[in-house]
Amino acid sequence: MLRKLRYMYYSIILSMILLAGCGQQTRPVSTAQYYNPAKETAADTEEAEGAGAETSIGTDLYLIIGNDMTNEQLNLKQLASGKQYLYVYSLSTDFLDKYGNSATTMDFEPGRVIHIGKKDGEGRLLQAQIADEVWEYSDITKYSVDTERGIFKIADSKYSYDADLFVESNGEKIRLSDLNEKDEIRVVGIGTKILSVSVTTGQGTLELKNTSVFEGSFIQVGSKIFAQITHNMKLEIPEGTYTVTVANEGYGGSTEVEIARGENCTLDLDELKGEGPKTGSIIFYIDVEGATLSI
C-alpha cells in the first residue's frame, strides 16, 4: 500500500512538472515563411531555412507582392529562388529609400523591389530598403506588349519578361492581358528584363502641409492605409472618399477627403490640431497615518 501511494505521489508530481513546462512555453512571431500560393492548406506552408538571419541589409532581391499595413506584414518573393516569404514589421522598422534616406511604409508598394535586413528578438523586421540595382519608370502611357514573343516595349525600347511576370492594380494581381491602352503604369526592371508592372491609373495624390506638430506620428487614411508623417509629405492613394485621422501628444482630429484620379488634394494639418493638450490638477487625500503614495 505504501509503495502504491508513493507511486501515485511521483506520478502527480511528474504531471505537474509537465503541465508547468507547457504553460511556460512561448511562441515566437512566425516570420520568413515560404509557401506555394496555389495550395491553400496550412500543411503546405514551410519554414524558410535560414531566412531573415541577416544582421544588416542583405544583398538578395525581393519583389513586394503585398503590403498589409493593417496587420503590418510584407509578402515578398525572393527573385533568386522564386519562393515567397511573409515578414512582419512594426513601428520600429526602419524603411529606407534606395539612397538610404528615411521612407514611409506606403513607399513599399506591390511591384517594388527591396533588400531586407535586421530582425528584432521577436522576429520582426527592423530594416528594409528599396533596391538601387533596379530601375523604375513611372507614369508610362506609351507602351505595347507582344505576348507571342515575350517582348514589352516602352517608347522605343524593348524589354523581355518571364511568363510569371507580376502585374497588379491597386494591390490586386491581374493578368498582362488585362492592360489596356488607357492605363498608366509603373514598371520595375533590371537590365533589359521587366520584373513587375503596376497600374497607377485611378490614383490621386494627398499632399500634407503644416505637418510640424504631427511629424513622427502616424496618419491613417481609410481603414488600410497608415504612414509615418514626414515634412509636407505626399501620398499616392487610389481614388475615393476617405476619413483621414492624425494624432500626436494631445493634438489631432479627423476629416473626410476626396481623392480624384490624377488630381492633387491638399490637406492642412493645422486645421486638425484641435484645442491641444489639456492640463489639470489632482489632489490626493490620505487619512491613514504613515501611509506613502507612489505614482
Image (cartoon, rainbow, N blue to C red):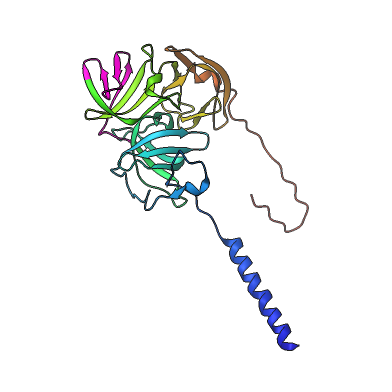
State the residue at coordinates (63%, 33%): 279
Counting from the top left corner in percent of width and height, residue 230 is at 42, 28
Q: Position of residue 233 (x, y in %)?
A: 41, 23
The image shows residue 94, relative to residue 196, as above or below, that is below
Residue extending farthest front: 148
With 269 as the anchor, is 286 left or right in this view?
right
Residue 255 location, quadrant: top right
Q: Position of residue 113 (x, y in %)?
A: 33, 33
Compare residues 261 and 104 and report the one nearer the observer: 261
Q: Which residues are magenta?
A: 130-157
Q: Is residue 35 magenta?
A: no
Tell me if residue 148 is in the magenta stretch. Answer: yes
- Quarter of the rendering occupied by the N terminus: bottom right
For the point 43% across and 29% down, the residue is 106
| Percent coordinates x, y for residue 194 in the rendering | 28, 28
**177 displayed left or right of 246:** left
